[in-house]
Image (cartoon, rainbow, N blue to C red):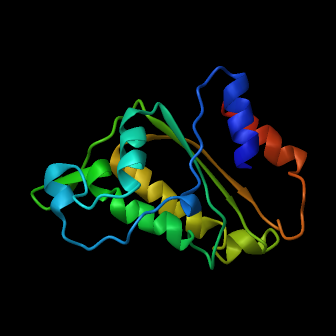
Amino acid sequence: MLRCATSAAKRAGWQVQTINLYEKNIAFCRGCRVCIETGRCPHQDDSQEIAALLKSCDAVVLAAPAYWANVPAAVKNMFDRLLGTAMGERNARPQPRLSRSQRYLLLTACNTPAPFSWLFGQSRGPLRAMDEFFHYAGMSRMGRVAFSGAAGKTTLPDRISRKIESYWK
């Protein structure tokens, strides 16, 4: 799904940079909340690189498989560490730090076949978690694509490819 999205974006003339969270050194959030005040996490690791890209990008494509109706731990950890980059607080209310002109596209895949993947929240869970982060950050949603019943599939169904590609036209 991500390969399809990045290829479509490149064909449409976008500059693309891909980040694999499993290749990055991102420590766990310590809950100090310094980032809420300063806009950046005080703990130095690869999260600063991702924060800088997030602040400067026009669009984000986040592809994450469904793990028990939620995002994988690496994605949740990234969200925790980017909290101050994405939002601040005023009067105990979240305040977005990113722009409505920045867009995001969410991609997820799960092994549970449709319609059960949707009925039991396997696809909805990760999409909801990812959507919530970017929404509260202030970004605009391009779209959301779920590939249910992905177990054992080696190719992307044409309907999924077409849907992903449609966001870059």
- Judge left or right: residue 12 versus residue 151: left
- Judge left or right: residue 118 versus residue 80: right
Q: Residue at x 65, y 69 (%)?
A: 66
Displayed quadrant of residue 65: bottom right
Q: Is residue 82 above or below residue 129?
A: above
- Judge left or right: residue 121 versus residue 84: right
Displayed quadrant of residue 5: top right
Q: Is residue 13 above or below residue 23?
A: above
Q: Quadrant of the C terminus?
A: top right
Residue 93 visible to the viewer:
no
Query: Which is more toward the observer, 88 or 74?
Result: 74
Q: Position of residue 27 (x, y in %)?
A: 38, 69
Q: Position of residue 72 (x, y in %)?
A: 57, 71
Residue 168 visible to the viewer:
yes
Query: Which is more toward the observer, 165 or 45?
Result: 45
Q: Is residue 146 above or below residue 72?
A: above
Q: Position of residue 46 (x, y in %)?
A: 41, 55
Q: Position of residue 112 (x, y in %)?
A: 78, 74
